[in-house]
Amino acid sequence: MHETEQNRYSRQIKLPQVGVEGQTRLLNSHALIIGMGGLGSPVALYLASAGVGRLTISDFDRVDESNLQRQIIHRQAMIGEPKAASAQQAIAQLNPQCRVEVVDYALDGKDLIEAVAAADVVVDCTDNFPSRFDLNDACLQAGTPLVSGAAIRWEGQITTFDPRDPVSPCYRCLYPDTGVEGATCAMEGVIAPIVGVIGTMQALETLNVLLKTGVGLVGSVLMFDGIAMEWQSIHLKRNEDCPACQQRPDYPTRG
């Protein structure tokens, strides 16, 4: 690790759970972030600032004025520009040492599976159920941990699915109905900081996964009520009859 890197990340290196070895692990890690909206904004900024060496950011949408109320990675001058490119510029200004790969089209099929397999962790910052189910299937196929977040109105939730853990549930254990149609922020509205709260927690949980600090939120769903200012945790057991994860392959060992 270079002297400049030791200085930049010195406050993290002081932590016994990180140290030089852990920071080096982060610098050599690759996170795939799907969605550069309200959740993806703090996720990308915090992972880049914490020293995750490689980020692949995926979003096919363009910056709209209505996004700026909560999507803090974008700026007024970027209205009309692709969100992925806008986010890349912001990350470069924050930490030019972070390698950012932009995917400005919808990842699906073989492209999605390959992108998921190439990452050490996937962070789901999407806003619709079909995308979440596709991500879940790809992570199950590749054996890649998935940090999932959602936020709407004044509430949000976060959990982690790790297919390498035989007792870990998957997204379909939580939401078994793939035909469900969820509400969106455009339909229901959202208070600005709620996506920041959940997105920041996703970034923290992603660092836990990369640093292997513990089980984290595998098997738990953490829910936040922004009006009551209360957190609630519920235990989520794996569904042995889940059609998505009942027969998992033997995954190769990752570093």
Image (cartoon, rainbow, N blue to C red):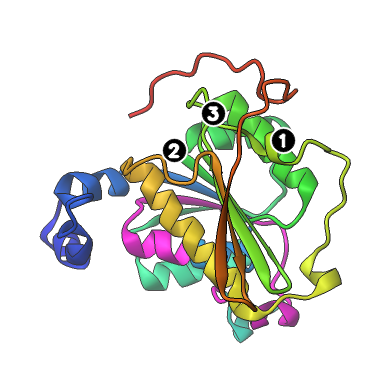
Q: Report how many numbered discs are placed on residues in the image.
A: 3
The disc label shown at residue 172, or none: 1
Which percent across, then down, holds residue 240? 67, 21
Is 155 displayed left or right of 6 in the figure?
Answer: right
Q: Tag 2: residue type?
A: Asp
User: Which residue is drawn at the image coordinates 20% and 66% (left, top)?
Assistant: 11
Residue under label 2? 120
For the residue pair 227 and 15, the one nearer the viewer reads as: 227
Q: Earlier in the sequence, mark 1 or mark 2?
A: 2
> Which numbered disc flags the more N-terminal residue, 3 or 1?
3
Would you say residue 53 sits in the magenta stretch?
A: yes
Question: Magenta segment, which residues?
Answer: 44-73
Residue 229 sits in quarter:
bottom right
Amino acid type of the residue that numbered disc 1 sits on in the rendered structure: Arg
Q: Is residue 32 magenta?
A: no
**Residue 95 left/right relative to 130:** left
CA–CA distance between discs 2 and 3? 12 Å
In the picture as drawn, the residue positioned furthest to the bottom comes out as: 76
Query: Which residue is painted at 60% across and 18% down in the image?
Result: 248
| Residue on which disc 3 sits | 163
Residue 138 image offset from top left, x and y in percent: 64, 32
- Labels 1 and 2 touching (C-beta < 8 A): no
Q: Residues within 10 Å of mark 3 (few under 14, many from 20)?
A: many
Q: Is residue 69 above or below residue 19?
A: below
Residue 172 point in image, percent of width and height: 72, 35
